[in-house]
Amino acid sequence: MGQLKIMLVDDEERFLVTTKKLLAKKGFDILTATSGSEALDILGTEKVHVVILDIKMPGMNGLETLRQIKKLYPMVEVIMLTGHATGETAVEVLKAGAIDYLMKPVDIDDLVQKAEEASEKRQRLEAKIRGASMAALQ
Amino acid sequence: MEQKHFKVIRKKILLSMILVPVIPFILILGIGYYYFVTSLETNAIASMKRISADHREMIESFLTERKSDLEFIAGSYTFQELSRPKALAEVFNRLQGKSDAFTDLGIFNDAGLHVAYHGPYRLTGKIYKDTQWFQEVMKHGYYISDVFLGYRKVPHFVIAVAHEEEGNKWVIRSTIDTFSFNNLVRKVHIGKTGEAYLLNNEGMLQTERHSGGNLMDKPLDRIQYPESHRTTKSFIDKDVNGVKYLYATTWMKDKKWLLVIRQEKADAFEALTSAAYLIILIAVIGGSVIISVAFYLTNGIVERMTQMDAEKDQLGRQLIRASRLAELGEMATGFAHEINNPLQIMKSEQSLIEIFISELKGNGQLSQSETLVELEDSLNQIGLQINRCAKITQAILKFGRQSEPVAVDVNFKQFIPEVTAMVAKKASVNGISLKENVSEDTPLIHVDPGQLQQVLLNLFNNAIDAIIERHGSSGGELIVESGPKENGKVEIAVRDNGQGINPENLKKIFSPFFTTKPVGKGTGLGLSVCYGIVDGMGGIMDVSSEKGVGTIFIITLPAASSNPLIL
C-alpha cells in the first residue's frame, strides 16, 4: 500500500517540527496541523492513514476533533496523545473511536510502533472490505 | 485556655450537682427536725402542765381534807368537851387513825390561850393572842401556815379552824407532819430529773427538793408566776448552776403556795437529742454520698468532654490535612500536565539529536573521538533525566487524580492473598517471610479493590525496602493482619521488622514529596497517595515506628454494613 501517511495534530509547533523530522527519518510521510480544524481541512484533501492527535488544544479540542474525524473519515485511525491520562478520558477516547492513546512525554519508538499497529489494523480492515465487496460483485 | 475552660465547666457541674440535691436534702432534714422539735416541746409542756394540775389537785384535796377533819371535830364536840385532855387525846387518836399526818391537836379559847393540847410537846397554857396565825384564823375562820420553826424548832406547819359556839369563838389547831406532806408533794415521777416542790409567796421552800434545797431555804432560781389562780405557767430557764429546766408553776387554791414542777430540759427532750444526733449523722452521710457521687459523675463527664474535644481536634486536623492534600493535588496535577508538553518536545529533540549524530557517524562526517563519546554520554543522560521527569509528573498526576472508585464488598481474607502474591517473589528473593494473620471474623469492607490493592502494595514495597535496608537478604519479616474493631470498623495492620523510621521523619511521612529514598528512587508521593485513598474510603491511616525495631502501618476502615456512603 506504499508509504504510511501520518498526520500530527498539536498546538505545540516545535513538537510538530521535531517529530515530523524524526518520523520522516523513520521513513514516514508526515503532515502536521496546529489545530483540529486545520487537521479536518487537510483530511479533506489528503489521504492520511493515521492521525496522532493531542487531546488538549485551544479551539476545537482533541476529543471533539476525534469525533469529527471518525464521523467524516471513519477509515482514518486515530491515536490520542495526552498529557493527562485519566481513566475516564481514556475510556471516553476509546469509546469515541480512537485506536489507542499515549501519554506525554512519549518515546518516539513507541509512537512509531503504535502508528504501525494502527496502520496494520487498518490494512486488514481494508482488505476485509475489499474481499467483501468483491464477493458481493460475483 | 482549654484547660481553664474545662475547669470552669467542671466547677459549674460540680456545684450544681452538689447544690441541687443538697438544698432539698438539708431543707427536708431541717423542716423535719423543726416539726419534731415543736411537737416534742408542745407535748412535753402539755404533759408537764397536766401533771402540775393533777398534782395541785391532789395536794389541795389533802389540805382540804385535813381542814375538813378539824372542822368536823369542831362541829362534833363542844369547847368544853375538847378542853379536857383525856377527851382530846381520844379525839386525836381517832384523827390520827384517819390520817397520820396529824402530829398533835390543840384547843384555844378566843383569847389565844392554849386550853388543851395533845402531842409530843408541852404547850398547854401558852398564849397565842398576838401571833399572826391566831389573828388570821379568828378573822377568816381557817388558817394554813407556811412552814415555820415555831417554839418547837422543828419545821412544821399548822392548820387551824375557828368555831363559833354560843357567841364564843374558839380554835382547834393541828400540826401537820412535814415529813408525810413532803413525801406527798415530792411524789411525782417525770423522767429521771422530774421533781415537784412548793414555794410560799416569799419564794421559800415549803417542801424538800430532790435536786437539793432544804425546807425553808430560799432557792435562787428564777421563777415565773402564773398570771392568775387556776392557770399554769410553763417556761424554760436556767437554774443557778446553769442547767436548763423546763418549768410548770401553778398557785394552790387555799393558800399562797406555788407548786413548782420542773424537769431538766436535756431529760425532757432526750428524744430530741438523739433525733438531732441522728439527723446530723444522716446529713453527714447523705452529704458525703452526694458529694462523692457528684465528684464521680463530674469527673466522668469532664473526662468524656475532654476526650471528645481531643477527638474533635484530631478530626479537625485530619480534615485540614485532607483538604490541603486535595488542593495540593489539584495544583500538582495542573503543574505536571504543563510540564509534560515541554518534556515531550525535549524528548523529541533528544531523539532527533541522537539520530543526527548516528547519521553523521554513518557517513563519516564525525570521526570517533573522546569528545564524541562524552557527547553521546551527555545526550544519553539528558534522555534519562527526561524520563525521570516524566516519571515524576506521572506520579503527580496519579496522586492528583483519583479515578472514580467503584466500591464493592471485599472479603479481606480472600482478597489479601492476591495482593501478597504480587510481592511474594520480591520478598522471597530478599529472604523475607511473608505472613498473613487475618482473623476469621474480619468483617466485609466496602471499598474499591483496586485502590485497596494500590495502598497495600505501596505499604508492602516500602516495608520490603525497609527490611532489606536492615537485614540484607535474610531474617526479614512482613506480616499483614486484620480483625474487627469496635464501632463497626475493620483494622488492617502491615507490620515489618525493617530499619524503622525516626520520629522526625514519622511526622512528615504522609506529606507529598517527602522521601528518604535516594534521589531518583522515589517520588515521595506513594504514602500521601495512600493516605488520600484511605481518607476517601472514610478510613484512617496511622503509623508507629521505632528506629531499629520496625514499623506498623494501621489502616482503620468502616465495615461494609455500616458504610453505605462511599464516593
Image (tube, helix red, strand yellow):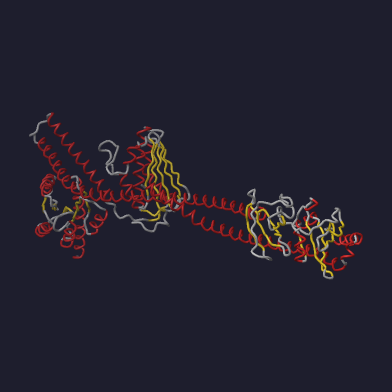
Q: Nearer the viewer, residue B57 or B191?
A: B57
Q: Which residue lies at the image location 38% right of the left edge and 56% below the top edge?
A: B408
Q: Which residue lies at the image location 11% right of the left edge and 53% below the top edge?
A: A34
Q: Quadrant of the C terminus of chain B?
A: bottom left
Q: Nearer the viewer, residue B278 or B207?
A: B207
B355 with respect to B157 (left or right): left
Place of residue B89 in the rendered image (x, y in percent of width and height, measured from the top left): 90, 59
Q: Nearer the viewer, residue B455 or B424?
A: B455
Residue reaching furthest bottom? B166
Place of residue B253 in the rendered image (x, y in percent of width and height, measured from the top left): 72, 65
Place of residue A16 in the rendered image (x, y in percent of width and height, measured from the top left): 12, 49
B467 with respect to A129 (left or right): right
Q: Nearer the viewer, residue B188 or B396?
A: B188
Place of residue B285 in the rendered image (x, y in percent of width and height, measured from the top left): 57, 51
Residue reaching furthest front? B111
Residue reaching furthest right? B86
Residue reaching furthest left? B365
Number of marks drawn: 0
B529 with respect to B270 (left or right): left
A87 with respect to B217 (left or right): left
Q: Which residue lies at the image location 73% right of the left edge and 55% below the top edge?
A: B206
